[in-house]
Image: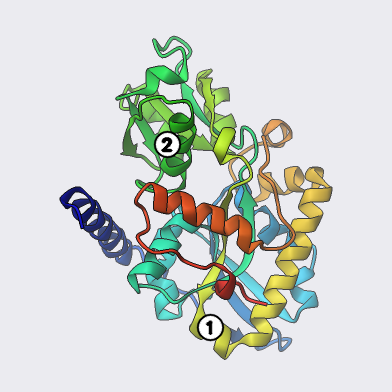
Amino acid sequence: MPSHRLHRSRSRTKHLAALVAAAAALILVGCDNGATPHPADGRQQLTVAALPLTDSAALYLARDRGLFAKEGLDVRIQPVQQSIQALPALLKGQVDVIASANYVTYFQAYEKGTLDLRILAEGVRIAPHMMDVRVPGDSALKSPADLAGKKVAVAVLNNIQSLTLNAILDARHIGRPVYRQILFPQMGAALQRGQADAVHAVEPFDTAIQGELGARVLLDGGSGPAKGLPASGYITTAAFVKKNPKAAAGFRRAVEAASELAAEDPAAVRAELPKYTKVTADQARSIHLPAYPPTADPAALGRLVRLMRTQGLLTKAIDPAPLLVK
């Protein structure tokens, strides 16, 4: 293997290991030890870690519309700021499912043998303006070409945001920026203080940053080769599926039904967002929503895998089809 590829592979391995090690200090506490029966009504209890993003809308819709209850499930939702924070808890059985799980992180963990990954359902696919590269209103950056070499904030390094932004810029033959890791809730302040030249924010933080700072869109992060790309899903372990096949199948059906509802009735999503995010009802009405696919598509996931390999985020050709729970 050429030296630069070996160095890149080692860097990815160290980066993933560092994320998991750091997240170990943030393991969710007070969670049940995986798929326990509810003492009151016999429903099987599942603990699901989820981010306060539009990605998680189907999860909350399924809970609030009684779709989980219909499947005999009592789903408890544990909020987290990064899906990687929940990985140690998932491996220990303290969390059963991670919602809004960034596929890039979990395909990397699967390739390294850290996680025997299974995908219960798709979360969202990238749609126009569901994430944007924003700059201050008075920024000297006037076009995407100006991003070359500039500091751009992303929530997690070497992940879906940098992957898609790199793809968009590469397609335009534009130089890439330098990425800096800043959590979504902190991006607005970082932009205001000049800690980043631009932020790559997803909804609902994208709209919030625009409203609070008047930050303007420099580039639609859901455009070009990023459009339609699977971004996140509902993931678990092979061990959980083997032990709880009925619960796994029921969870999948409930989320897929909720995703179909979200796709057909965006107003239902907009009504749900203020319940689990910090956006107001007024803000929710203007948010750009992602696409909510009712079923998982191995071909679409294969497209993501190929893009990851092109950018050196995977070294092997992973077949997503066997990872999808039926």
The foreground one among 101 and 308 is 308
The foreground one among 115 and 227 is 227
Q: Is residue 117 above or below residue 105?
A: below
Q: Is residue 320 above or below residue 100?
A: below
Hey, what amino acid is under mark 1? Phe
Q: Is residue 203 above or below residue 94?
A: above
The residue depicted at 30 percent of the width and 59 percent of the height is 16
Q: How far is disc 1 from disc 2 in space, using C-alphas?
A: 35 Å
* Coordinates of residue 118 in the picture (x, y in percent): 53, 73
* Coordinates of residue 242 in the picture (x, y in percent): 56, 88
Q: Nearer the viewer, mark 1 or mark 2?
A: 2
Which type of secondary structure does the marked residue at label 1 adopt?
A: helix
Provide the residue designation for mark 2.
Answer: 166
User: Which picture quadrant has residue 258?
Assistant: bottom right
Q: Label 2: few (<14), some or many (≥20) within 10 Å?
A: some
User: Which picture quadrant has residue 43?
Assistant: bottom right
Residue 235 placement, left or right of 124: left
